Image (cartoon, rainbow, N blue to C red):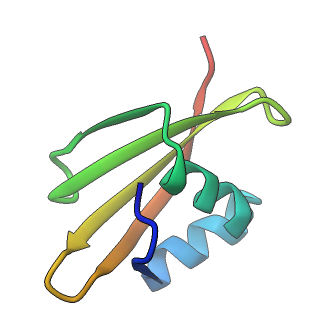
Amino acid sequence: MYEGWHIDYSGHARRRMRERLIEEADVNAALSEPDAVERDQAHGGKLLSRYLADWDKILKVAVVERPRENVLVVKTVLWSEAS
């Protein structure tokens, strides 16, 4: 979905990745092939979701696009229970 874009992780996103044991490869999978994309009211961008079978959870990645610069800013990451 964001092929060729530079991915920039906020300090907050990096901290949450460490706390929640989320690997950069998992975030990249959600960015490249999300199962769902919705507007993210809280962070003013998009919320991309991808089910990760190894965890049996849904990874949600909040992003803000900066298309003029071809930059995608990852604002935060979180887990959601799979239903």
Quarter of the figure with the N terminus: bottom left
Nearest the eye: 62 or 15: 62
Name the residue located 60 percent from the left edge and 10 percent from the top edge: 83
Name the residue located 72 percent from the left edge and 63 percent from the top edge: 25
Asked if residue 10 lies left or right of residue 82, the reply is left
Asked if residue 44 lies left or right of residue 18, the reply is left
Q: State the image coordinates of residue 76 (x, y, percent, origin top left).
A: 44, 63
Asked if residue 3 lies left or right of residue 66, the reply is right
Number of marks present in the image shown: 0
Asked if residue 35 lies left or right of residue 17, the reply is left
Name the residue located 63 percent from the left edge and 19 percent from the top edge: 82
Among the 4 quarters of the image, the one containing residue 44: bottom left
Q: State the image coordinates of residue 22 (x, y, percent, origin top left).
A: 71, 59
Q: State the image coordinates of residue 18 (x, y, percent, origin top left).
A: 71, 71
Among the 4 quarters of the image, the one containing residue 2: bottom left
- In the displayed structure, 11 sits above or below 19; it is below
Question: Looking at this rendering, what residue extends furthest in the right direction?
Answer: 54
Name the residue located 37 percent from the left edge and 56 percent from the top edge: 62
